[in-house]
Amino acid sequence: MAFTHLAVPYGTSEEYLRLVLPALIDGLRRGDRILFVAPEENLDLVRAHLGADASRIRSIRSQDWYGHPARVLAEYFDYARRGGPSLFVGEPTWRSPRDAAEWARVEAIVNIVCASLKGAALCVYRRPAEEALRTHPRYLDMAGEHRSGGYVPPQRMNWDPPPFPAPPDGARVMEFDLPTVRAMRSFVRTTATEAGLSDDAAGSLVLAASEIAANAVEHGAGHGTVTIWTAGTDLVCEITNPDGGGIEVEFPGYIPPEQESLRGYGLWISRQLCDLMEVQTTGRESRIRLHMAMA
């Protein structure tokens, strides 16, 4: 069974049951490992119809699963690739337009990360935006399963964020090279904690910034600049690598490195550690912005 990635739009509770329940029953009949993620009311709805079979399904509330997009992608990939065919049925929830944009990227990348796996992912949306059909090759509605005419393969999507605005006046700045990387770490930690970031979050930011800086030193121009400021409730840490040839990796930091690989972990680790990581390459210069929520 090849991997299938479906968008499942619905409007009413009756439609939800008629679309989701058969998929879960078929998965139970096949003996799939099943992960079912939904709002509490839909979990209860399905449990009531499945009866004792509901205990054979791992069920999680949407608000408990859909947290950090990159971490969820990594967790789902780990789940899907072990133990034979799997079925995932999930109804996304997010807190902000920024979350929605990041989830759209994750939905698109699922088509690459899981392409060689056996199983299916059904992403259920109450009255979905058009974006859902752009990131799912197929969709399921009350008339059956269809090819999504609006689907755009991840390789053809525009992954570049809008041009970064310049850091604000008053941002803290430090240049670094190989001999000063340790001092750069101290600079990031001190600046972050003085701005109000917790010790744990500051430690995560230091590690993420260190990974990016190490890439700049080892594979880029050998030096760079770190700039830190606050933007709303976020602390932003930007690492600039001038004349480093830019970042040419597809989907930087989203796809876990192969388990046997000795390289390629820096961007992935940094995206896992931070609340948001933005990557922009202009000519030969790369700029990576690491966001940490202070609230």
Image (spheres, grey):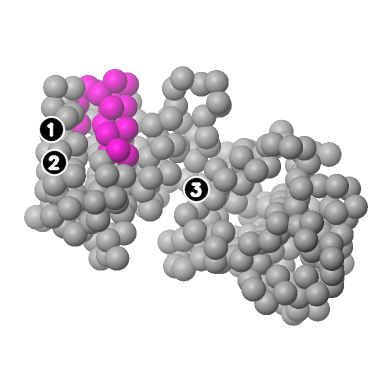
Identify which residue, 129 or 18, lies in the foreground. 18
Q: Residues within 10 Å of mark 2 (few under 14, many from 20)?
A: some
Residue 92 can be seen, yes or no: yes
What are the residue bounds of the magenta stretch?
Answer: 207-225
Image: 132 above or below 212: below
Q: What is the x, y in percent for residue 220? A: 29, 24
Q: Residues within 10 Å of mark 1 (few under 14, many from 20)?
A: few
N-term mark: 3 or 2: 3
Count the marks: 3
| Badge 2 vs badge 1, beta-carbon distance below 8 Å | yes
Residue 244 can be seen, yes or no: no
Q: Secondary structure at mark 3?
A: helix
| Badge 3 vs badge 2, beta-carbon distance below 8 Å | no
Identify the amino acid type marked 2: Phe
Q: Which residue is mark 2?
A: 187
Residue pictured at 68% horizontal, 37% vertical:
81
Q: Which residue is mark 1?
A: 183
| Badge 3 vs badge 1, beta-carbon distance below 8 Å | no
Image: 190 above or below 113: below
Identify which residue, 177 or 155, lies in the foreground. 177
Q: Quadrant of the N terminus?
A: top right
Q: Secondary structure at mark 2?
A: helix
Identify the amino acid type marked 1: Ala
Which mark is on residue 71? 3
